[in-house]
Amino acid sequence: MNPGETSGREPVRPEIALSWKRSALSGVGPGDGFDADPATDLDLSSRLLRAARPILDEVAIQIAGTGLCLLLADRDCRIVARVFDNHQVERKMEKLGAVIGSRFGEDTAGTNAIGTPVEVRRGIVINGEEHYLERLKGLSCYGHPILHPVTHRVEGILDMTCIAPRANSLFAPFLQRAAADIERRLLEGSRASEQRLVDAFQRVSPQRHVAVAAIGEDILLSNRTALDLLDVADHAALRGLAADLLPDQSRTVNLELASGRLAKVQADRIAGTNGGTLFLVEQVHRPHVPIRRRADRAGVVDRARSELRRVRATAESVAIVGESGSGRTTAVRDLAGVDAVRWTDASRIPIVGQGRWLSALLEQASTSGGVLAVEHAHLLPASILPVVTDLLVAEGGPRMVLTSSPIEDLPPAAAAMIARCPERIAVPPLRQRLGELPEIAQAMLDEIEPGLSLTSTALEALVAGEWPGNLTELRVVLTRTARDRTSTRLGLADLPDAYRTSSRVSRLAGRERAERQAIIDALQECGGNKVHAAAKLGISRSTLYSRIRALEVTP
């Protein structure tokens, strides 16, 4: 059946045709069965259900004797509540997969009155033949999204369904009123939640020698001490700490702040506040004075800096090893200090030829003083390795500095050459420097376009990244973000889609990280086709969708 027609009878509405196209692109076939695969991690005490429960009770009375059913789904299109007129309707809907926890997004169930309203962000009628799946064509429905009055985010979807070829025209105003009532209760609940967090903050905020912060979903409170002590990067770390707490749970940890100071943090999750958490932050005085990071952010203190300072005082050859993009070239400049650096790059040998490249190297090595840096030394051909090895121990020439991949990744001959360097400095990859990432990112932004800064949510997403390209990748991301920015404060929405990763991902265990990466790889290899990716992974499509949601994979 083509998207522009319905069994040869009448044209399909444009919004339905677009929905069919989205369904097909998601790998759903009209004749496919629907694997409900109910989720088991539903929050049955969520603010959506608390707000909707009285409205659902009223609807149950109003639809008595009509043969209708009402479904409430969360923002992930998972059914969280159901209201039926009779047991016959309930059994019919359950046979079609409409059970608690089952997901009716367009990517699993095609065009329907739960998944489609989420895509179009408005109410929509889906008459029988307009459903994408053949098995749903005996139903007619109206679905309406529930939007939070403050954030305007989709909180859930109401779906009124009847077993008939066409939906009743009264479905729309009926569900619109019900959705409005739920939205009003969401607002009241949000205000009450925020008030509980404010009350908890006000009880302890007068303490002068303790930094007090209260962080909720859409609220951040700080006393004067917290304003002086905590940076925007610290707020991201506190949000990550709160994510692991249960309501009324308390936890005390030691945390190194962005300033380099050590603090004892007591985190108290406040019940009834949608994740709101109260933090008491008290600075811990170390037995020695901590090294403060430079206020001008011109350079970033990392674990290799002390080694660079020590080696700078010597005249011996040095190997600076680390992953590509981790800052090896910057380390060479830091090592050289005020000395002049002459550069040569082994990656250019295939371009200029071995003979010409080697002649230029020997010419530079014939001079005295300064530093001669050979970048990408791991790419040196076997025939040139002995020459470079001799230069490492030669006297009277410039100081030799090689940059290379980690020695454990090198072939034996190249590893033997690196081992001949009396000094070796390992530059850590960015994933091992995530505590410094906020400062590194700000330093890069100051170079790219002074005056820009990152919000705490954006920093939280960057800290959760994998960064296989290290500092080079981070600079590319920040350059693109600065180019496409909407203001001088770069938020989560300004980051490229692939980097809007939540802090939860950064806390995944090793097995879950490996599973997440396997799903990402399979989706990339299959061009985003979930059906083919599921087959490649050896799992069902519904299981793949479930794991994509659980592991927060962006398809």
Image: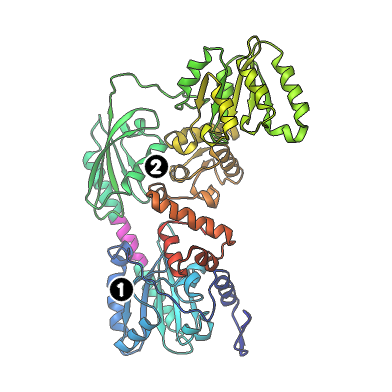
Q: Residues within 10 Å of mark 1 (few under 14, many from 20)?
A: some
Q: Nearer the viewer, mark 1 or mark 2?
A: 2
Q: Residue at x 42, y 78 (%)?
A: 173
Question: Measured from the top left, where is residue 31 in percent x and y?
Answer: 52, 81
Corner quadrant of residue 189: bottom left
Judged left or right of residue 293, residue 243 is: left
Question: Measured from the top left, where is residue 40 in percent x and y?
Answer: 32, 66
Q: Secondary structure under badge 2?
A: helix
Q: Main secondary structure of the magenta part?
A: helix
Q: Which residue is mark 1?
A: 55
Question: Measured from the top left, where is residue 131 in percent x and y?
Answer: 51, 81
From the viewer's side, name the closer residue of 152 and 416: 416
Which region of the structure is painted magenta? Answer: 183-192
Q: Amino acid at mark 2?
A: Ala
Corner quadrant of residue 366: top right
Q: Which residue is mark 2?
A: 236
- Residue 249 visible to the viewer: yes
Q: Amino acid at mark 1?
A: Ile
Q: Is residue 445 above or below residue 287?
A: below
Q: Secondary structure under badge 1?
A: helix
Q: Give the mark count.
A: 2
In the image, residue 191 lies in the stretch drawn in magenta: yes
Judged left or right of residue 5, residue 246 is: left
Q: Residue at x 28, y 20 (%)?
A: 287
